[in-house]
Image (tube, helix red, strand yellow):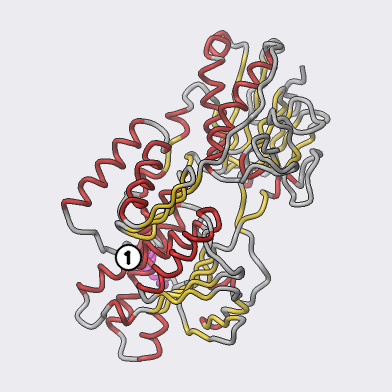
Amino acid sequence: MVKAANSRGTTPASPDCVRVLVVGGGYVGMYTALRLQRKLKAQLKRGEAEIVVITPEPYMTYQPFLPEAAAGNISPRHVVVPLRRVLDHCRIIIGEVESIDHAKRTATFTTLATEEEGTGPVGISYDELVLAPGSISRTLPIPGLAEYAIGFKTVEEAIGLRNHVLEQMDIASSTRDPAIRDAALTFVFVGGGYAGVEALGELEDMARYAARYYHNIKAEDMKWILVEASGRILPEVGEEMGKYTVRELRRRNIDVRLETRLDSCEDRVAVLSDGARFPTRTVVWTAGVKPHPVLAASDLPLNERGRLKCTAQLSVDGAPHAWAAGDAAAVPDVTADEPGKECAPNAQHAVRQAKVLGDNIVATLREQPLQEYRHKYVGSVASLGLHKGVAHVYGRKLKGYCAWFMHRVYHLSRVPTVNRKSRVLAEWTLSGLFKREIVSLGSLEHPRAEFELAAGGERPKESS
């Protein structure tokens, strides 16, 4: 076994200890470590095994709940799961893996203290590697995108966007300049997948409700625009439900533009490929994701899309003792009729893959046969705002309240830990009894702003 040489800042494993290194603390990382923690409980107590999880954040984000967190239906604390509490028998390292040399079974990573220490990246070795770094936003070289747009992959972005939307309503309510008012009340979302459609649906619903408390803003004054490069939205729910979603959004006066691209958002003007121009202070980018850069910084085999080539047992093809699942992995779908089809990189597969992955690592350590990952895709559900949704599950098509209710029930069953399930259910119950919260906590983005101003500094300028 390869042990921890050059492991500054880490505790080397003993010669008789098997180290499993998990890269990433998202769906696959957390669920795999949780599975290993249960299966190897005796070995962990005896010091015969060690599970190390390296992740940039000390929590796992349940991303399907981000739109509801942005709308204020769920507290942001309840869409994340603290890794140190759940993985109490694992060693959690908050850091970023920089590179992986699987031939030597070593990885290098940086931590929050690396820059201050001035010693450079830390090295760690392993016996089994689980690569689950997730994905990052796929951006394009569009003028103004980096300066003015906001993503929707993290809880920080979701809450920041909620504060921003309410702040724009405050600006529109107080300004006497019609151009500023128009730009503040124009919201452009780019990308017609789950993230874009659900975020737009929930935030439009929230803003429509909030408008009743402004003396000079009506729901009809706001412009909500969805830009999608292809000819359909929500392809996961099927063509019929996708068309229904377009009709439902347009019925709510949301401008859905298919086969249209964002060409520029410089100077706070969204310029579309169909020639339309919208002065706006809000551009939300949800146009897809791409593999995490750490995959390219490894010696493991990648496919043409930059994902790890994997077998049906979730091992990396041609790389013994390396495993992957979720967004990072190209896993063959053994239940598909057509050859060569891969499992979709979504949460439905990721959670189930993590269970099989953990079991297969344990089977490898015990020299037992491995099992294949097989799960036939059962369908998809999507929320379009309070009491509104679409679903295509087990061949059945649902819309409206039934689909919305199914969306909530499904995701409540999938969010990790009884603690989180109970808290989310309690918040949903209370939100049905009391009015929505419409407060913008803008100071969250600049918590030291008031103190800096009092100490003689300048108030930070708005960046969005």
The image shows residue 330 at horizontal and vertical percentages of 70, 42
Identity, as a three-letter code, of the amino acid under mark 1: Asp
Please report the residue visible at 28 percent of the width from the left and 83 percent of the height from the top.
Answer: 174
Taking depth in this image into account, of 86 and 458 the one nearest to the observer is 86
In the picture, measured across the screen, residue 134 lies left or right of residue 268, that is right
Does the segment drawn in magenta span residue 276? no
In the picture, measured across the screen, residue 392 lies left or right of residue 47, that is left
In the picture, measured across the screen, residue 4 lies left or right of residue 428, that is right
Taking depth in this image into account, of 27 and 2 the one nearest to the observer is 27
User: Label 1, on which residue?
Assistant: 205
The image shows residue 128 at horizontal and vertical percentages of 70, 24
Does the segment drawn in magenta span residue 453? yes
The image shows residue 437 at horizontal and vertical percentages of 24, 59
Q: Quadrant of residue 175?
A: bottom left
Q: Which residues are magenta?
A: 449-459
Q: Residues within 10 Å of mark 1 (few under 14, many from 20)?
A: some
